Amino acid sequence: MMSGIRGGRVKMQRTLMLMVLVGVIGLSHAAIQRPDYDDTPNPEFLNPSWMASIPDDQPLSEVTLPGTHNTMALYGGVYAECQTWSLASQLRAGVRYLDVRLRHINGKLNLHHGVSYQRGHFGHVLQGVADFLWEYPSETVLMRVKEECSETYDIYGAVVDYIHRYAHWDLLWHSRIVPTVGEARGRLIVLQDFPGPDLGVRYGSMDIADDWKVPTLLHVEDKWQSVYHHLEAAPAGNLAQIYLTYSSGAGVFAYPRAVALRVNAQLFDYLSAKTDQKQRLGIICMDFPAAPTIQMIIDFQLREVQRPVFYAAHHKPSFNYRISSRRNKMLQHFL
């Protein structure tokens, strides 16, 4: 009996050692640029105006969109970093869904991933989005806004204040109703994940799969199954509802980069097998996405229409503001 107990302990110790090893492998690594995964500083190629080819009357809920999880999490080490591309690079690569986390401190909205400060504030994101939409008014940007690492549960007033100071009130889509692509062009759609009056579409109104807890890399297959089943459900789901699938995940023994290296490869293979099908997959939100994967996601609704025009000419957007004045305002409000 004692030998059985000892054998069980040895087996448990080996399992724990394996979990630790699998979780820390790759803590020191060189940057990688694969078709499915990219943690280099710049995308392999850009596609900033791909939405120009989508019909104006198509509901935004029927568009398949690439997105990034914890969009501004560029700092803090392997357990905090989820991206390596700047906001401008992500948008120009084709990303149209942003996941922005804000810590509310004395009226200021600092960018955070958990306790890790991301060296900026909400105004930087708003300015970056406004600049992008000024240059590419055929596009739209959806942005989840969530309070992170603070417990005020009252960021509405600060969010409104930042919008007025760093962007423009008319930049936003002011309705809970999901717009058509034509209505959304040149606008920021806030996916409101905090209490208060409506600023845009409610985050909770979407059909969301976000099984982000991946305790160890031994659980990656469970994570992939969650992603797979939600993507399989999206084409036949309610077309009036936005579907949102997070391929990202992390845990104590599985940091975001390590999970993305594995799940992104499975996602790429899954999408590659469906390239001959024209389907609505909704928003696919990733850590460390690569430009070829982003393009593959974009191509799902462009299968039967004209290819997007790269680097479209500048057009003035419908809302009235000046970039220079917004930059001046931001300079006056550094942290």
Image (cartoon, helix red, strand yellow):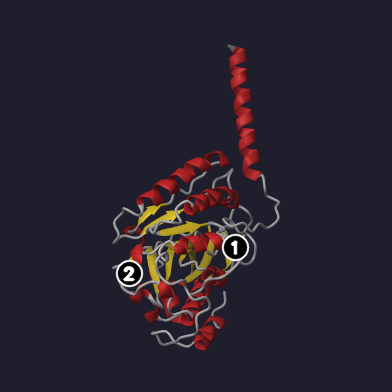
Check disc 2 and report the residue beneath it: 58
Secondary structure state at the residue bearing disc 2: loop
Name the one closer to the observer, 219 or 197. 219
Counting labels gives 2
Residue at position x 32%, y 69% from top? Answer: 58
- Quarter containing the N terminus: top right
Pointer 1 and pointer 2: residues touching (CB < 8 Å)?
no
- The three-letter code of the residue at mark 1 reads Leu
Name the one closer to the observer, 22 or 315. 315
Check disc 1 and report the residue beneath it: 74
**First reached walking from the N terminus: tag 1 or tag 2:** 2
Q: Position of residue 81 (x, y in %)?
A: 59, 57
Mark 1 and mark 2: span between their CA atoms?
Answer: 34 Å
Answer few, some or many: residues within 10 Å of disc 2's Cα (few below 14, many 20 plus, some between 14 and 19): some
User: Is 145 located above or below residue 267 in the figure?
Assistant: below
- The three-letter code of the residue at mark 2 reads Gln
Q: Position of residue 188 (x, y in %)?
A: 41, 73
Answer few, some or many: residues within 10 Å of disc 1's Cα (few below 14, many 20 plus, some between 14 and 19): many
Seen in the image, is 263 located left or right of residue 22?
left
Residue at position x 61%, y 61% from top? Answer: 75
Name the one closer to the observer, 266 or 330. 266
User: Is 314 located above or below residue 207 in the figure?
Assistant: below
Secondary structure state at the residue bearing disc 1: loop
Q: Position of residue 155 (x, y in %)?
A: 41, 67
